[in-house]
């Protein structure tokens, strides 16, 4: 396939578009919490997949990511022995996810990619979260799509195929852009194109990713969004 075959680029967000670990660690420092900010960020994020699994199993009803983040925040605070925050402070802390900072190449790269493609989110984050994030970080989406729209979290097929349905496109006319190979593999199995983005610092300064090599299933492999834009002919 050539890049001209694709009409829509759908982007994973946490880690691919924004730096969740660095953003959370920075805010924890600013708040003055007596914890290792990198450890706090990692532990909070580690509750993400298990929380979604509780929804998938039927243990919990459909739940927005904001609410799952709040559940995992409560457990994280217990883990670190923090029991002095007020309800309002916890609410504010949970909204960190709405104001995550983009990677340095993100906004410029998205603007370039937008010149040739429709660019949309495809995130497990809920619509309100993604909208606030876009406004805060200046993310130039054409459309914000979320697991909330499809009532399925990635990597359920309904999410990837839902993008195709919304735009009335065949799967091979849509490409998922992500820094997570499990996400890309699931999209590939649904017939979508895939672009892997290296984000070596996603998990913080003390975690070296070992999964940044090229994978033959992916249509494209790029260092960052500017590299992807170059490969897709968007820099001229």
Image: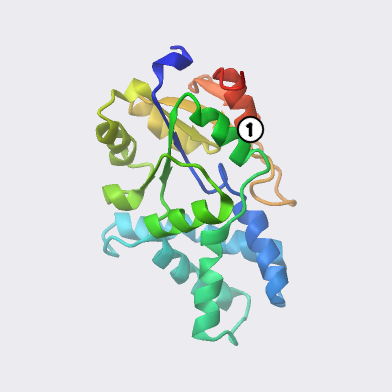
**Image quarter (top left, top right, bottom left or bottom right) of the N terminus:** top left
**Residue at the image position 64 percent from the left and 66 percent from the top:** 40
**Residue at the image position 63 percent from the left and 34 percent from the top:** 198
Whether residue 213 is visible here, answered yes or no, is no
Q: From the top left corner, tell me how far across and down residue 188 is, in percent.
A: 40, 27
**Residue at the image position 40 percent from the left and 59 percent from the top:** 128
**Residue at the image position 64 percent from the left and 39 percent from the top:** 199
Q: From the top left corner, tell me how far across and down residue 179 is, in percent.
A: 55, 37
Q: To which residue does mark 1 refer?
A: 224
Whether residue 166 is visible here, answered yes or no, is yes
Q: From the top left corner, tell me how far across and down residue 27 is, in percent.
A: 66, 66
From the viewer's perspective, tell me whether residue 143 is left or right of residue 170. Answer: right
For label 1, the SS is loop
Q: From the top left corner, tell me how far across and down residue 149 is, in percent.
A: 29, 49
Q: How many marks?
A: 1
- Residue 84, located in which quarter of the rendered image? bottom right
């Amino acid at each position: 396939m050539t890049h001209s075959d694709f009409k829509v680029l759908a982007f994973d967000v946490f880690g691919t578009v924004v730096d969740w670990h660095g953003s959370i660690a920075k805010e924890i420092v600013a708040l003055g919490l007596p914890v290792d900010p990198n450890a706090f960020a990692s532990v909070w994020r580690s509750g993400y997949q298990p929380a979604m699994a509780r929804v998938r199993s039927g243990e919990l009803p459909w739940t927005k990511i904001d609410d799952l983040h709040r559940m995992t925040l409560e457990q994280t605070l217990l883990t670190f022995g923090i029991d002095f925050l007020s309800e309002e402070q916890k609410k504010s802390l949970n909204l960190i996810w709405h104001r995550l900072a983009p990677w340095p190449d993100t906004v410029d790269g998205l603007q370039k990619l937008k010149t040739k493609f429709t660019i949309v989110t495809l995130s497990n984050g809920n619509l309100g979260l993604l909208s606030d994030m876009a406004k805060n970080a200046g993310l130039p989406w054409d459309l914000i799509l979320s697991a909330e729209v499809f009532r399925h979290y990635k990597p359920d097929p309904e999410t990837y195929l839902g993008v195709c349905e919304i735009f009335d496109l065949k799967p091979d006319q849509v490409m998922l852009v992500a820094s997570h190979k499990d996400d890309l593999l699931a999209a590939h199995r649904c017939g979508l194109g895939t672009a892997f983005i290296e984000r070596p610092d996603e998990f913080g300064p003390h975690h070296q990713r070992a999964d940044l090599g090229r994978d033959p299933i992916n249509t494209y492999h790029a260092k960052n969004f500017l590299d992807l834009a170059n490969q897709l002919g968007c820099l001229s």
